[in-house]
Structures are given as structure tokens and as C-alpha cells.
Amino acid sequence: MTDHNHKHSHKPSHIHGHHHSVSGRIGVAFFLNFFFTIIEFVGGWLTNSTAIMADAVHDLGDTLSIGMGWVLSKLSDKGADTHFSYGYRRLSLLGALINSVVLIAGSVWVLIEAIPRLLSPEMPHAEGMFGLAILGVVVNGYAAYKLSDGKTLNERVLNWHLIEDVLGWVAVLIVSVVLMFVDWPILDPLLSIAFTLFILFNVMRTLKTTIKLFLQATPDQELREQIYQQLLSVEQVADVHHLHLWSLDGEHHVLTVHLVLNQCLDNGVQQRIKADLAEGLKSYQLAHTTIEFEQPEERCRDGE
């Protein structure tokens, strides 16, 4: 006997609004990044700054990644069908995986460009750098702020793209101010390397989580233990096995479990137990639950 509990069907307007806000946040970030990338190329040419031109190329990669993430996020809003029985939410996870790889590749590229400049630093146009840096911090900072409330892995990875841009422009801003007073062009590659390593470290952690979710690892061991103990505490339940907790996109989790009853119960009692279980699991906000009851002497068809 099974209990299919689709949490997302209870409040469709709320969930739809949530998905719309996710797509909207990513859309704003995309257009801000796209238009500012154009400004960067023009500004880099006018200031004759190779550092800004390099950042423009990097931002172009970010723009493409955010655009892809936007498309995948919109596709993930589609409901379940016969081809994708859990819906399209895992496309958002795919976006997080691809964007993590792109961001890591971009960070490696920045390091390859910055490290040689330690040996032969070039003096850039400090005043032009200062003006573009102010604009860069404002534009990318606002885009990062728009995605800061996002909870999906896709949004978190895209937010790291933007945070990397903000930190990069903070580095340009600091260097431009210093270079107005002293002749220390080596500060530019030093700060670029430091910020890039910081971002690279955090993205690698996110990539590790994303890969684990792709492999259907348990998203939260503490959450799994809490659910296990709650199910086992039910008076009529003698044993809990085949408890599988996995995630569609890092935010929406799926639970399947077998509960062994300590005595044979009629349908009415089983229905009441199911209702109690549904109420007890409500606080975990699971996207989908499947609970199967097994009689005391019944052999589990999936094996122990």
C-alpha cells in the first residue's frame, strides 16, 4: 500500500509564483551582465587596459552561463509528464553543473592571464579604470543582490559568477586608486589571483554538492535521521527500511520508504496512520513522498 504525497499540488499559485521569481531574478542578472559586458569592451578599448579587456571576456562567459541558466530554470518549471515523471526540476541542477564547470574554467583562465603579469606588470590608465570600476561594482553588485535570495543550486552558482565579478571590480577599484598615487602595477595581478582563488574554492564546494545530488546522494544526513526517527516513533510501526531521500534540484526533496507494521490493521486504521504521517512530514516540505506499509509477516518484495 502506498501513499503519494505531492506537496507541490497543495499550493500551486505559491509554487508558480516562486518559479516565476526565480526565472525573473536570473533574467534581470542576465540582461545587466549582457549590457555591461558591451560597456566593458568599449571601456577596455578606450582606456587601453588589458586587465579590463580580460575581465570583459570573462564577463562574456558569465553572460553566456547566466543565459543558459535562465533557459534551464524556465524549462525546469514545466510540470511532470510521461517522459519526465518528476517534472523538469533537474534541468536546473544540470544548469548548476555546467555553470560550475564554466566558472572553474574561467577562473583557471584568469590565473593563466594574471600569473605572467607578476613578472612583467604593465601600468594601466588609472583614471579610466576607476570610472569603470565604480560602474562595475554598482551593476554587478545589484545583479548579485537580485540572486542573493535564491535557494536553488542553479541560482547559487550563478550568484558566484556575479560575486566573482563584483570582487574583480573591487580589486580594479582599489588598484586604480593606489596607482593614482604610486607606481605599483603589480597590485593588479596580485589581487586578481587572490580573488580568483577564493571564488574557485567556493565553486569547487558547490560543484561537489551538485555532483553528489546528480548521483542521488542523500542531500542532508541530519534531515534523513530526523525523518527516520519520526517514522520509527509511530506506535504501529515496528521497523523502517528502504528509506530513500534524494533531491531533484537541491531544494525539492523526494522520500520513499517502507514501514513494517507491528500488527495487521484494517484499512480505516491504516488511513488514519497515513494522515498522521502526512501531517508529521509536512514540516519537512518534501516535494514528493511514497510510503508503503508492510504486514508483520509479509516479505518485502524489494528485499531487505
Image (cartoon, helix red, strand yellow):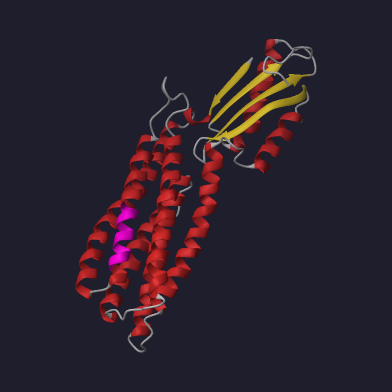
What residue is at 28 percent from the left and 71 percent from the top? 50
Prevailing SS of the magenta stretch: helix
Give the image location of residue 80, x and y in percent.
43, 25
Quadrant of the image for the C terminus?
Answer: top right
Q: Quadrant of residue 38?
A: bottom left
Q: Is residue 58 magenta?
A: yes
Query: Magenta segment, which residues?
Result: 53-63
Q: Quadrant of residue 70?
A: top left
Q: Quadrant of residue 257?
A: top right
- Please tell me which residue lies in front, 145 or 122: 122
- Please tell me which residue lies in front, 118 or 82: 118
Give the image location of residue 108, x and y in percent.
43, 59
Above or below: residue 11 compared with residue 28: above
What residue is at 46 percent from the left and 23 percent from the top? 85
Quadrant of the image for the N terminus?
Answer: top right
Left or right: 250 with respect to 221?
A: left
What residue is at 58 percent from the left and 34 percent from the top? 246
Give the image location of residue 67, x and y in percent.
32, 47
Q: Is residue 45 magenta?
A: no
